[in-house]
Image (cartoon, helix red, strand yellow):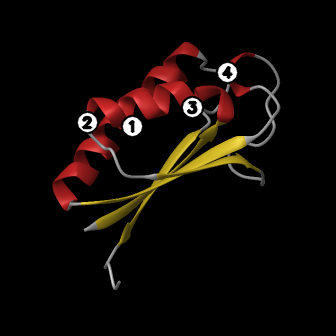
Amino acid sequence: MKMVMIVFRDSLKDEVLTLLQAREIKAYTLLSEVTGMGQSGVVRGGFASLGFNSLVLAALPDQHADQVIDALKVFHDGLAGEHPSHKAPVHAFVFPCTQVV
């Protein structure tokens, strides 16, 4: 099992949740209005507007996690292609995950 953590601009929430739903991911935790500083920094205008981030945590079987990561890479690359002067504000991380309770 893997824990997938996705951090993204709040303005992309619908697209990210649709991506999960399309892969039949029905169990996840969504944290809204997450703040911090990162690689994308503060970007003005377009999809990367000032504001909050959102964060999704999903504990998934390895195969589902790999499918989600592959789809996120395509989504990220599409955003980067549409806005080449900005870093796409979508980041994903994978951690080993063991359910203990």
Q: Which numbered disc, 4 or 2, marks the residue that appears first in the sequence?
A: 2
State the mark number for residue 13.
3
Q: Amino acid at mark 1?
A: Leu
- The residue tagged 4 is 47
Res. 32 image quadrant: top right
Element on which disc 2 rests: loop
Q: Tell me how far mark 4 sits from mark 2, CA to CA.
A: 24 Å
Q: Which residue is the site of mark 2?
A: 23
Q: Nearer the viewer, residue 99 or 2?
A: 99
Residue 59 in percent (x, y) is at 35, 62
Nearer mark to the viewer, of 3 and 1: 3
Identified by mark 3, the residue type is: Lys
Quadrant of res 22:
top left
Is residue 94 at all visible to an observer of this figure?
yes
Q: Amino acid at mark 4?
A: Phe
Q: Neighbour class for label 1 at 10 Å: few (<14), some, many (≥20)? A: some
- Which numbered disc flags the more N-terminal residue, 3 or 2? 3
Distance between the alpha carbons at the discs numbered 4 and 3:
11 Å
Q: Secondary structure at mark 4?
A: helix
Give residue 101's position: percent from left, percent from top: 35, 84
| Residue marked by disc 1 | 72
Placement of 28 over or under 84, stated as above or below: below
Q: Residue at x 32, y 78 (%)?
A: 99
Q: Residue furthest front?
A: 101
